[in-house]
Image (cartoon, rainbow, N blue to C red):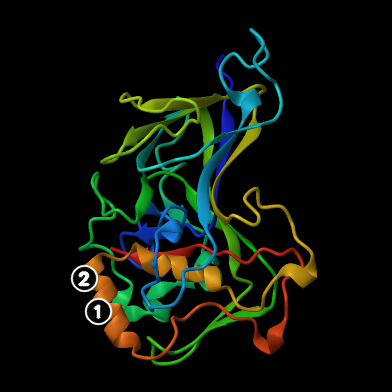
Amino acid sequence: MVDWFNLEIALTGVCTLVTDQPIGNSPAKMHLVIVDGWENSRKPNRTGVDGEQLPCRHGAMVQFPLGNLPGAGSGGRPRQGKGVWYPKRHSLAFSFVEDSENRPELNAFKVHPELPQHVADMTKIAPGFASLGGSDVLDSNPHSDVLANALFERGTLSFTANEAEAWVFSSVLAAEPVVVQGMAAEVILTLRRLSSMTLTASRLQSGGSPRRGNPGREEPDQLTLVATRPNETVRMTIAVGCEENPLLWEESQSQTPPEDVDFRWHYEIFSPAEKVRLRDALGDAKLPVPRRPENKRLAKGRNCFPAFFTL
């Protein structure tokens, strides 16, 4: 009998999530788009869509348990610890082998009913700029500000709330300020009763290898996870974090600013033409980013949030 496992894919940091319809309307699939917040910030005289200096560099990583790789513990392969991929101009394709006894609807794509209340929903924050359906960011050859993309059509989308206090987005691009209670620090995609999961990283135009030490490889790289014991929960993370805290360690209260300026990276996902339109709409105003009322600070230092756009 083949052991099966439950898989949690945590999406955290500046992950741009694009659903086929607004997050509150029962979408049937979700795209992940990762902005290139590393190389772009190093370009001379590069500023953000609002003309201001870009936030600190943000890098992307895919983190996975080494113990769930096939053959872990044999041939000198580690049983414990975490491995990391660093995508660079890649399409990330996930495939799942589900337990043969699964009902087809078990892993049908669905959204936790409370999730829409706890995320940065761009259809409310910037309704005129919430749709990426006409953009190339979801294609196999997106514009140069896209580091990686992926598509999810299976699983249940839930969340981990940051704290109970509210975050507020200004009304620069909306009719009124948007208040989000307990904004999600991470969005979690859960799939149940899997026999295996395979992640394939294929090059986008001018891409590199997602593994360090393999420059110039043309063929796709693959990563497979399997169960090590019956009915275990395996967790992997896709994170887009700042260079000051790349491994997402918890930080002290004094280190966390009351305003999440890193949220501005989400607006860099737009095409050059859309950026011009957004800049014109802003005028002299600043981009709407989440801010804590009364200058309160986060206890755990987590202040990079995913955002939801729509097709």
Q: Is residue 142 left or right of residue 80?
A: left
- 69 to 27, vertically: above or below: above
Q: Nearer the viewer, residue 59 or 310?
A: 59
- The single residue placed furthest to the front in the displayed view is 44
Residue that mark 1 sits on: 277
Residue 282, picture quadrant: bottom left
Which quadrant is home to the C terminus?
A: bottom left
Residue at the (46%, 73%) spot, across then down: 53
Residue 72 percent coordinates (x, y) = 63, 17
- Whether residue 30 is visible: no
Q: How many marks?
A: 2
Q: What's the amino acid at mark 2?
A: Ala
Residue 278 percent coordinates (x, y) = 30, 79
Q: What's the amino acid at mark 1?
A: Arg
Instruction: Name the mark on residue 235.
Output: none
Residue 180, picture quadrant: bottom right
Residue 102 percent coordinates (x, y) = 47, 32
Helix, strand or loop under label 1: helix
Disc 2 residue crowd, few under 14, some 14–19, many 20+, Cα 10 Å: few
Residue that mark 2 sits on: 273
- Whether residue 94 is visible: yes
- 86 to 215, vertically: above or below: below
Q: Is residue 159 left or right of residue 133?
A: right
Q: CA distance from mark 2 to mark 1?
A: 7 Å
Q: Nearer the viewer, residue 224 or 115?
A: 224
Helix, strand or loop under label 2: helix
- The single residue placed furthest to the top in the displayed view is 75
Residue at the (35%, 24%) spot, across then down: 217
Residue at the (61%, 62%) spot, across then down: 185
Residue 117 percent coordinates (x, y) = 53, 73
Mark 2 in CB contact with mark 1 (< 8 angstroms): yes
